Image (cartoon, helix red, strand yellow):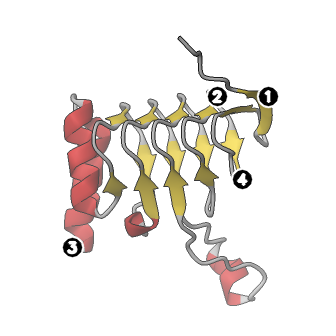
């Protein structure tokens, strides 16, 4: 996909009025999006490396969430070889919930059924069925499914 077309599709997805439409546009951009995924308004996914992002079935990505598969330093740092980090895969597990305004950094796996609290900055993996919060995100609670 051309750079200009990809940019246009990401802007369209960012502003689209329907979460189903946002998810389908991100799929067309190269993000692996499972079925039944809720994609919140103004959610921003990495535009340079969308193929490094995988979102499992029934996951929920809140409004204003940022998911970045790479962190590239300034041209100054790159030229002087002070900092360079290539893209790393991000996996949002089945049924996970990333709440409003959270930031997911490169190389992170959010486990199945995990919850990332609003505004959290996640730089390390989140175990399944765990609630994380803060900056940097830390485990706050282990989630126990109710038995009927």
Q: Secondary structure at mark 1?
A: strand
- Residue 90, x across and y down, in percent: 54, 59
Q: Is residue 8 above or below residue 148?
A: below
- Residue 6, x across and y down, in percent: 25, 64
Number of numbered discs present?
4
- Name the residue beneath numbered marker 1: 140
Q: Is residue 141 above or below residue 2?
A: above
- Which of the two marks, 1 or 2, is nearer to us in this view? 1
- Name the residue beneath numbered marker 3: 1
At 39% from the left and 62% from the top, the residue drawn is: 47
Cα separation, mark 4 vs mark 3, equals: 29 Å
Dot label at residue 117: 2
| Left or right side of 138 for 18 | left
| Mark 4 surroundings: few (<14), some (14-19) or many (≥20) residues within 10 A | some
- Name the residue beneath numbered marker 4: 123
Q: Secondary structure at mark 2?
A: loop
Q: Are marks 2 and 3 in contact (CB under 8 Å)?
A: no
Cα separation, mark 2 vs mark 3, equals: 34 Å
Cα separation, mark 1 vs mark 4, equals: 15 Å
Q: Are marks 1 and 2 in contact (CB under 8 Å)?
A: yes
| Left or right side of 115 for 46 | left
Q: Is residue 20 above or below residue 122?
A: above
Q: Secondary structure at mark 4?
A: loop
- Which of the two marks, 1 or 4, is nearer to us in this view? 1
Q: Choose the circle earlier in sequence order: 1 or 4.
A: 4
Q: Choose the circle earlier in sequence order: 1 or 2.
A: 2
Cα separation, mark 4 vs mark 2, equals: 14 Å
| Mark 2 surroundings: few (<14), some (14-19) or many (≥20) residues within 10 A | many
Q: Quadrant of the N terminus?
A: bottom left
């Amino acid at each position: 996909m051309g750079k200009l077309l990809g940019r246009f599709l990401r802007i369209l997805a960012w502003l689209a009025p329907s979460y189903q439409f946002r998810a389908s546009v991100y799929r067309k951009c190269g993000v692996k999006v499972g079925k039944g995924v809720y994609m919140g308004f103004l959610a921003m996914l990495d535009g340079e490396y969308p193929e490094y992002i995988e979102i499992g079935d029934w996951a929920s990505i809140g409004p204003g969430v940022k998911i970045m598969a790479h962190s590239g330093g300034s041209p100054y740092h790159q030229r002087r070889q002070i900092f360079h980090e290539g893209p790393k895969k991000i996996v949002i597990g089945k049924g996970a919930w990333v709440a409003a305004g959270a930031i997911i950094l490169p190389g992170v796996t959010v486990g199945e059924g995990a919850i990332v609290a609003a505004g959290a900055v996640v730089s390390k993996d989140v175990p399944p069925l765990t609630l994380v919060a803060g900056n940097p995100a830390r485990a706050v609670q282990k989630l126990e499914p109710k038995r009927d």
